[in-house]
Amino acid sequence: TFDLTGKKAIITGGGSGIGRAIAIILAAHGAEAHIMDIDEAAAEKVVKEIEAENGKASSWKCNVADATDVQAVFHKALDGAGLDILINNAGIAHVGNVLNTSAEDFDRIYEVNIKGVFNTLKAGVEAMKSGGGAIVNLSSVAAHVGISDRFAYSTSKGAVHAMTLSVAKDCLSYGIRCNSISPGRVHTPFVDGFLSKNYPGNEKEMFEALSKTQPIGRMGRPDEIGSLVLYLCSDEAAFITGSDFAIDGGFVTL
Ligand code: NAD
């Protein structure tokens, strides 16, 4: 069973898309969801959705790229209690190859997608190490296959995969399991923002074209990602650590 009653969960970037779906499914299975997002209003909206279904949730404004902010917010949110589940989901996208990616953009992607995960792992493992727990990091298919124009993004997600292995190894003795998941294209505001920025006026055609690049013929849904994360956080997955799971309609393998 997937009973998370009494478990405290932190979901970064939980105000939108995949993070929102993860927060909703964890709370629906009994977890208390602490939703941290740089966009406080978005996080608060998800809290209201969860509360409307009689779930437990709270919203926290947090910039994962800011180590001081992360330490302070984790401290406040947990209030001395241990942490059971950490979902490192906050991330930002970038389009560019090795030649046209600016040093500034490279740093910006790394600050959020790598340093951000480092910051929350540091605070999260500290809060988890006395009681054990489960960590799921959001990597991407972009860490596993070459995708055009994703230089900074792909390498940042490769680092997420490597951080997962390192934490899984070093934190085994604390009873902490750490895994990553690598979604293919999932229909979220992240994708809509990408299409309107890069293909203004042509969003519909590009949406169809992107859907067809996945062998299964469509994009994934955020709730489908949520189901995998729920499993990985539950005791049903007690034998799984240091693994990465593709959830991509066959994109990487077929
Ligand atoms: P999204 O843009 O819909 O949501 C991301 C959330 O993270 C937003 O609420 C945003 O406010 C928050 N956020 C951004 N920067 C932050 C920061 N510095 N501190 C705290 N919160 C911050 O994105 P999504 O599509 O739901 O993606 C979620 C994760 O999944 C990302 O790590 C992304 O790289 C990964 N991913 C997405 C896809 C996809 O196709 N959507 C595919 C593979 C991997």
Image: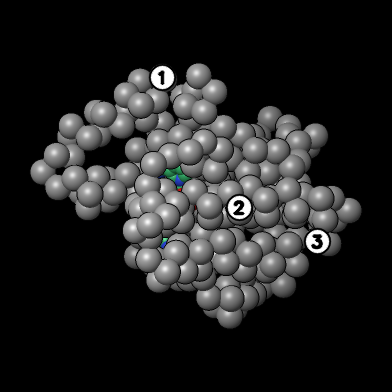
Q: Residue at x 24, y 45 (%)?
A: 195
Mark 2 or mark 1, which has the lower sequence index?
Answer: 2
* Residue at the farthest right position: 173
Where on the picture, by quarter, is residue 191?
top left
Indicate the position of residue 39 as horizontal and vertical percent values: 37, 66
Front of the two marks 3 and 1: 1
Disc 3: which residue: 129
Quadrant location of the N terminus in the rendered image? top right
Q: Secondary structure at mark 1?
A: loop
The three-letter amino acid code for the residue at tag 1 is Ile
Number of on-image labels: 3
The three-letter amino acid code for the residue at tag 3 is Lys
Where on the picture, by quarter, is residue 109?
bottom left
The three-letter amino acid code for the residue at tag 2 is Val
Disc 2: which residue: 160
- Between the C-alphas of marks 3 and 1, the distance is 40 Å
Q: In the visual, does 39 lie left or right of 152?
A: left
Q: In the rendering, which numbered label is found on residue 216?
A: 1
Mark 3 or mark 1, which has the lower sequence index?
Answer: 3
